[in-house]
Image (cartoon, rainbow, N blue to C red):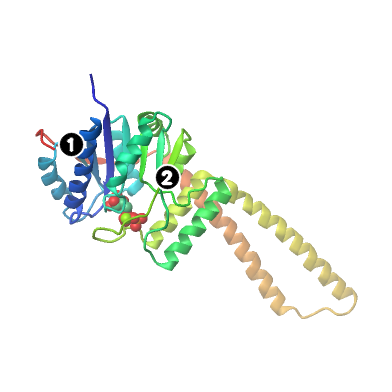
Amino acid sequence: MRRTIISVVAPVYCEGDQLPEFVASLTAELGQLKTSTGLDHEVVLVDDGSSDNTWEVMRTLTAQYSCLRCLRLSRNFGKDAALSAGLAATRGDAVITMDSDMQHPASLIPEMVALWRTGNVDVVDVCKQERQVESLLSKVCAMSFYRLFEMLTSYDLRGSGDFKLLDRKVVEAWKNLGERKLFYRGLTSWMGFRHEQIMFTPCLRCGGSSKWSLARRVTLAVDSMTSFSGKPLLLIGIITLLFYALSFFVGCEALWSYATGHARSGFTTVILLILLTGSAILTGLCIMSAYIHHAFIELKGRPRYLLAETLEAQNTDS
Ligand code: UDP
Ligand code: MG
C-alpha cells in the first residue's frame, strides 16, 4: 500500500549560502517525523531565477538527499509564482509551504501534521504572533495594507504568512485557479476549506537579506487589492459626488457674494480649486489604470512561470 507523503515546498531566491543549512535542518525534522509517525516526505525547492550560486548548490544537495527535487524557473517570477510552480510539482497528501531563509521554523512541522491528521483540518495557517524585526516604515506600511485589504475584502490577513499546510484537495483546487497574478496568502483564505491556526514568532534570517524592497511591496499591495476587490472603482463615484457637492456650495457662495456686492478677487481660491480638481481626476485615473493593468496581464494569458530545468535525486539515502 502507498505510504502517506508529506511534501514541503520552499521558494528560493539568491539563498545559495544558507541553503545547505536549511535543507539539513528541514530533512532532519522530516526524518524524525518519519520515525515517529511512518510518514514519508519529499522536498521541492524552486529556484526563482537566482543570480547567485543557488542552482549549483541545489545540484550538490540533490546528490546528497534522496527526498529532494529542484525546479529552476527561467527568470525571477516572484515568490508567489515560485510557490505555484512548487505546488504543481508535489505528489504529497499534504503540502507544507515555507520560506528557505529559516524564518519559518521546521520544528513546527510535527504540530502542523498532527493537526491535519485529525481529519478536521484542510489548511493549517501558521500565523505570526509578532512581526519579524523590520523598520518602522515597513511595519506601518504592512499594517496599513492589511487594514485596507480587510476594509476592501473583509479578509483579515494580519499575522498570516506563507507558512501553511494544505491538504491535497486544496492543492488541486489551487491548481485549477485561472488567474496569472497570484497572492498566495489571500487566495488560500478566499478558497475557504477548514482552516486552523498555529501561532509562532518568526526567527531571524539565517543569512542574506530580505528580497522585498518597498517598491516590490507596493506593487504586491496594488496587485492584490485590484485582484480581490472592485471597491476602489466605486471610490471614483464617491469622489465625483463630493465634487458635485463642493461645486454647488462654491457656486452658491460666489453668486451670493456677487449679488451682495462682496465678490472677492479669488485668485487663491481658483488655484486651490484647480489643484483639488486635478488631484481628484488623477486619483480616479490612477485607480482605473491599476485595474486596466491587472486586466491587461490577465487577458494576455501568459503562463504564471516558465520552467528552465528540473533536478531529481537518484540515490536512496536521505
Ligand atoms: N523569494 C522568492 N522570490 C522572490 C523573493 C523571495 O522565491 O522574488 C523567497 C526567498 O528566497 C525566501 C522567501 O521567498 O525563501 C521569503 O523572502 P524574503 O525572506 O526576502 O521575504 P521576507 O521574509 O522579508 O518577507
Ligand atoms: Mg524572510
**Ligand 2 placement by image quarter:** bottom left
Q: In the figure, 238 relative to 297: above or below?
A: below
Which residue is drawn at the image coordinates 71% and 75% (left, top)?
A: 269
* Camera sees residue 161: yes
Q: In this view, does 7 lie to the left or right of 17?
A: right
As drawn, the label of residue 247 is none
**Residues at marks 2 and 1 touching, judged by CB atoms closer than 8 Å:** no
Image quadrant assignment for residue 208: bottom left
Between 244 and 223, the residue placed more toward the observer is: 223
Please identify, in this view, whether the residue under mark 2 or under mark 1 is nearer the observer: 1
Foreground residue, 58 or 284?
Answer: 58
Question: Could you tell me residue 2's position as x and y percent?
Answer: 23, 22
Look at label 1 and name its amino acid: Cys
Residue ID at (28%, 46%): 107
Name the residue: 19% across, 38% down: 31
Query: SS class of the residue under badge 2?
Result: helix
Residue 91 visible, this angle: no
Write down the residue under mark 1.
67
In the displayed structure, 4 sits above or below 217; it is above
Q: In which quarter of the image is the N terminus?
A: top left
